Amino acid sequence: MDSNTSASGYDIVLLDIEGTTTPISFVHEALFPYVARSVGEFLETKWQDPEVQTHVQAIAQQANQDVKDGIASAVAIDLATDTADEIRRKVLANVDWQMKADRKIGALKGLQGYMWRFGFESGTLKGEMYPDAVKAIERWAAAGKRVFIYSSGSVEAQKLIFGYSDHGDLLRYISGHYDTKVGAKTDAASYKKIAEDIGAKPARILFASDNILEIQAADAAGLQTVVSIRPGNAPIDVDCKFQKTTDFMTIAL
């Protein structure tokens, strides 16, 4: 953390993942490409899996809503009359454009999380962590501070990244997970909900993220904040009023 900044009087640590504990490149160069190159085979080989069908139904529901909303790239899916091959083709088409648009919606994230589970469990994927973030998480836990994750990625995906990380299973240090089901990360109300769910006063929570809009929302909710400065992250204005750090081990306990 910059020498003129500090955090104090916090009991809870709330962490973003992408650009904070984990390089942005891991998401865009490992996780997303894994789905893009494997989704066709997954749908073909695991079509009868009830969980696959649940995700297909969610993709179809979203696609049909997108068509109604006039989104040009969306492809309608009729689960009642389309053949299995037609449904698979249309699901692939919808997944393809949504991923290229980096769309953050539940139906897509649910399917991605399902696929990532197989990738992590097989050892094909390992969650890439910043070493200082791992040390800081261990230090916070040892000091009796509870650590929670709040990411736009699904809770399942979060658990995979931390459970199958390149530093081993880190889930033993994590007290809980939140995704956008609790609300948008740029909405102050989301952080108030998390504080209430945890049972902590907002002022006793330290939130770390690389996204200045998320930092502003958390600050508006009364949380302490720190901006994560990492290679590849969006640049932060030099006049940024918030605490900043390039190394989580410099954050005061």
Image (tube, helix red, strand yellow):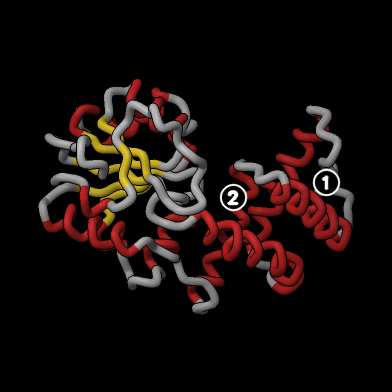
Q: Secondary structure at mark 2?
A: helix
Q: Is residue 183 visible?
A: no
Residue at 31 percent across and 49 percent down: it is: 176
Image position, residue 137 (x, y; %): 24, 56
Residue at 83 percent across and 53 percent down: it is: 90
Image position, residue 249 (x, y; %): 22, 54
Image position, residue 10 (x, y; %): 16, 37
The residue wearing badge 1 is 77
Type of the residue with mark 1: Ile
Which numbered disc, 1 or 2, marks the residue that appears first in the sequence?
1
Residue at 25 percent across and 31 percent down: it is: 224
The disc label shown at residue 109, or none = 2
Q: Secondary structure at mark 1?
A: loop
- The reply, left or right, for residue 12 in relation to residue 30 is left
* Total count of labels: 2
Question: Foreground: 18 or 121?
Answer: 18
Q: CA distance from mark 1 to mark 2?
A: 18 Å
Q: Is residue 180 visible?
A: yes
Quadrant where the image shows the N terminus: top left
Type of the residue with mark 2: Lys
- Is 243 placed above or below 55 here? above
Mark 2 burial class by Cα count in 10 Å: few <14, some 14-19, many 20+: many
- The reply, left or right, for residue 107 in relation to residue 220 is right
Image position, residue 41 (x, y; %): 74, 71
Question: Foreground: 240 or 137?
Answer: 240
